[in-house]
Amino acid sequence: MLKSIFNFYINSSLHVAIAVVCLSAVSFLNFGYNLSGSILLFIFWGTVTGYNFVKYAGIAKFHHSNLPPNLKLLQLFSLIIFMGMIVSAFNQPPAILFIAAISGGFTLLYALPVFSKNRNLRALPGLKIYVIGLVVSIVTVLMPLVLYEELLERDILIEFLQRFLMVIALVIPFEIRDLKFDLIQLNTIPQKIGVARSKILGYILVSLVVSAEFLKQEILPENLVSLIGVGIITLLFLKGSQIKQGEYYASFWVEAIPVMWLFLQIGFTGVM
């Protein structure tokens, strides 16, 4: 019973939505702003809707796993979440809706076969991980800060680049796990360079993320320490990634790293 509930929590995209909300909250805190419950809730609704649309709409033909047996329940759940997103959208200012439209557009292109040979962004060789990184960065950096900051300011652009690189590093364990399922034409990073070199690439990306913090005009100790902490955690999970990994290694533990990041950020903000 408990495992069924836990599997529903994972399969319904609740876990990944919480992770995305936590990344968004980190952006608020990194720039010294109070958390906006309205924006974070809108991000939560939108993330569940977007992920479930890609996974369960019957159009992501390159998704390797079978649909879960409780698909009807997931569809009903997704409909309720979608309605929540629509209601929440009425409470958002135009700038937030504009950012949401951009991320939503990429989500549609990721799922719908709109390109040649009936392909979507996900099916285009080598693009999947970068599209995920771009969309998550748009949602978790630009959407939280668009009402407070000029998005072309140096520190915002650095934060966006850091988030993009970190998300790519976090997706690598998933691509390693899926190596035995993914079609060869997807041309994922492990397919191109192998598992060992994919891990090394992940280590390099995390190092670049931490190093980029020193390029910001304002370097806050709590941000730097929490970033180093989450960087170490990410390195450990990258090191432990393998093709045959535990059932929840990537889908729960790796996706929980943003939650750990938020707790680190809150903790260090309180003591520094």
Image: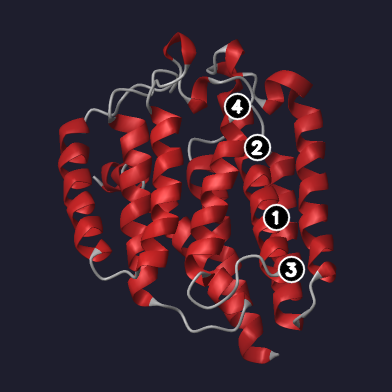
Residue at numbered disc 3: 154
Instruction: Tell me which label, 3 or 4, sits earlier in the chain.
Output: 3
Q: Position of residue 9 (x, y in %)?
A: 32, 48
| Secondary-structure class at tag 1 | helix
Foreground: 226 or 28?
28
In the displayed structure, does residue 77 sit left or right of residue 235? left
| Secondary-structure class at tag 4 | loop
Q: Quadrant of residue 128?
A: top right
Task: Find out whether the residues at labels 2 and 4 contact each other: C-beta distance under 8 Å.
Answer: no
Under mark 4, the amino acid is: Lys
Q: Residue furthest top?
A: 117
Q: Report the Cα–Cα distance between label 2 and label 3.
A: 28 Å
Under mark 2, the amino acid is: Ile
Instruction: Tell me which label, 1 or 2, sits earlier in the chain.
Output: 1
In the displayed structure, does residue 263 sit left or right of residue 104? right
Residue at numbered disc 4: 244
Q: Image height check: is 224 above or below 142?
A: below
**Which residue is rendered at x = 17% and y = 53% of the image?**
83
Residue at numbered disc 2: 172
What coloring was used for the rendering?
Answer: secondary structure
Q: Position of residue 13 (x, y in %)?
A: 36, 46
Q: Position of residue 243 (x, y in %)?
A: 63, 26
Q: Report the Cα–Cα distance between label 3 and label 4.
A: 41 Å
Nearest to the eye among marks 3 and 4: give it: 3
Task: Find out whether the residues at labels 3 and 1 contact each other: C-beta distance under 8 Å.
Answer: no
Instruction: Tell me which label, 4 or 1, sits earlier in the chain.
Output: 1
Q: In this rendering, does residue 89 appear at all? A: yes
Quadrant of the frame with the N terminus: top left
**Which residue is rendered at x = 36% and y = 43% of the image?**
50
